[in-house]
Structures are given as structure tokens and as C-alpha cells.
Amino acid sequence: MHLITSNGSRAAAERELAAARTELASLDATASPSRLERALERLRAAQDALAPAA
């Protein structure tokens, strides 16, 4: 059961990372600095969620 939960959590984290990358890529030069900052924070959080435990 734990393995299924772990795999499900990883899949969710991978989906979030893909969504964060898509969001960031969709921003153009007219995006507000705060929107860019939020998108970057989302990307960093998604990457951190997938990073191996230290």
C-alpha cells in the first residue's frame, strides 16, 4: 500500500512540475513581475518535491 501511495505522490509531483513549466513558458514580456515570481516559486516547489531526500 505504501508503494502505491508513494508512486501516486510522485506522479502528482511530476504533473505539478509539468504544469509549472507550462505556466512559466506561457508568460511573455508583458507578464507582471509578481506573476513571474509566483510562477518561479511554483516551479521551485515542484522541483523540490521531486528532489531525493537528503
Image (cartoon, rainbow, N blue to C red):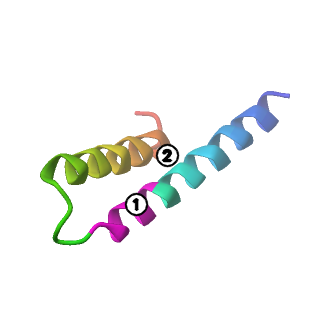
| Left or right of residue 5: residue 45 | left
Q: What secondary structure do most residues of the magenta stretch adopt?
A: helix
Of the two numbered discs 1 and 2 on the same chain, state the one appearing first in sequence. Answer: 1
**SS state under label 2:** helix
Residue 18, percent across and down? 51, 60
Q: Nearer the viewer, residue 44 or 2?
A: 44
Q: Is residue 9 magenta?
A: no
| Left or right of residue 3: residue 41 | left
| Left or right of residue 21: residue 41 | left
Give the residue at x 46% y 34%: 53
Q: Amino acid at mark 1?
A: Glu
Cα distance, mark 1 to mark 2?
A: 18 Å
Residue 33, percent across and down? 13, 52
User: Disc 2 marks which residue?
Assistant: 50
Residue 7, percent across and down? 72, 43
Give the residue at x 63% y 45%: 12
State the image quarter where residue 27 is shown: bottom left
Q: Amino acid at mark 2?
A: Leu
CB under 8 Å between discs 1 and 2: no
Mark 1 burial class by Cα count in 10 Å: few <14, some 14-19, many 20+: some
Span highlighted in magenta in the image: 20-27
* Count of numbered badges drawn on the protein: 2
Give the residue at x 78% y 28%: 2
Residue 24, percent across and down? 34, 62
Label ID, residue 32: none
Image position of 18 with respect to 26: above or below: above
Q: Quadrant of the C terminus?
A: top left
Q: Residue furthest right?
A: 1
Label ID, residue 23: 1
